[in-house]
Image: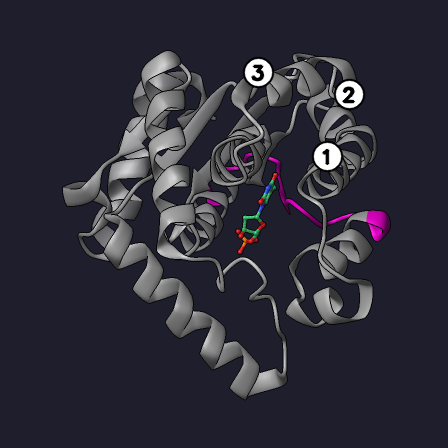
Amino acid sequence: MARGYFITFEGLDGSGKTTQLRRLAEWLRSRGHKVITLRQPGSTELGDRLRAVLLDSRSETALGPLNPMAEMALMFADRAQAIAEIIEPALAEGAIVLCDRFTDSTEAYQGGGRRLGSELVLQLHRAICNNLQPDLTILLLPSLTTSLARARRRNQRNVQKDGTDENRFEREPDEFYARIHNEYEAIAAREPERVLVLGEAESESSIDAVELRIRALVAERVPTLTHL
Ligand code: TMP
């Protein structure tokens, strides 16, 4: 059986990538494709537990400040498990895998945001993830101001609604997010073939317009995907 196709979605918190991933998945399914979706961190038993430790701002109080290297190691532990349990088996079955964040996030957040450097992230990716590369990455990059405002609004809503608290990252200062933004731009410049960027103007248009743009990009890059 032909190997499947691996697409990742990337962007700052509040960039709209999760909504767009869901919509692309529905569209591909409606065209008869087998689609597997997952998010990082999370989606395996281990990953969901790691997600709680990594994102819940209360775990900071319970566990003490999380060391940046420990944070990065946990991101890779989550990824190794997801690759083994979900991603590789799905690709081997010929499915399209849509993953909400992958190693570009570690490069942007830990490499750039926490200043651990890109090279270390890429080395770990080679060692731990067998250097698995997405076939395509959709990077949503609205302006920093827009992303931050959306992410903070969303987090407040979640806490009020069901007590979910995933705001450990949202409490970081704006300079942290500026470094992440820059790192994403650097990744896109380095790998223009793999990474398709929807920049400020494109990703700040309506959700429907962005959805159509992503479909067009996917269809253009991978013509066989849209045909049954
Ligand atoms: P999200 O699921 O809402 O995108 O949130 C995941 C958070 O985890 C987000 O703030 C980015 C962060 N993160 C990293 O810092 N490094 C990583 O490798 C991944 C996958 C996520």
Q: Is mark 1 within 8 Å of ligand 1?
A: yes
- The picture places residue 4, in percent across and down from the top left corner, at 62, 21
What label sits on residue 197 in the rendered view? none
Residue 56, image x and y in percent?
67, 66
Q: What stretch is highlighted in magenta?
A: 30-46
Residue 45 is inside the magenta segment: yes
Separation of marks 3 and 2 at Cα, in angstroms: 14 Å
Q: What is the x, y in percent for residue 155?
A: 48, 72
1 and 2 marks in contact (CB < 8 Å): yes
Foreground tag (3 vs 1): 3
What residue is pinned by disc 2? 128
Cβ of mark 3 under 8 Å from ligand 1: the answer is no
Q: Earlier in the sequence, mark 3 or mark 2?
A: 3
Name the residue carrying label 1: 79
The image quarter containing residue 71 is top right
Three-letter code for the amino acid on which mark 2 is drawn: Ile
> Depth check: 73 or 134 in front?
73
Colour mapping: one colour
Verify CB contact (< 8 Å) between mark 3 and mark 1: no
Residue 163 % position (x, y): 63, 83
Mark 1 Cα shell of 10 Å, populated few (<14), some (14-19), many (≥20):
many
Please give the name of the residue rendered at 30% of the width and 20% of the height, measured from the top-left corner. Answer: 220
Residue highlighted by disc 3 = 119
The answer to whether residue 59 is visible is: yes
Residue 192 visible: no
Q: Is residue 39 above or below residue 122?
A: below
Q: What is the total number of numbered labels drawn onto the structure image?
A: 3
Instruction: Name the amino acid type tagged 3.
Output: Glu
Give the alpha-carbon distance from disc 1 to disc 2, as whole Å: 9 Å
Q: Is residue 60 above or below residue 42?
A: below
Task: Decide if ligand 1 comes within 8 Å of the CB at mark 2.
Answer: no
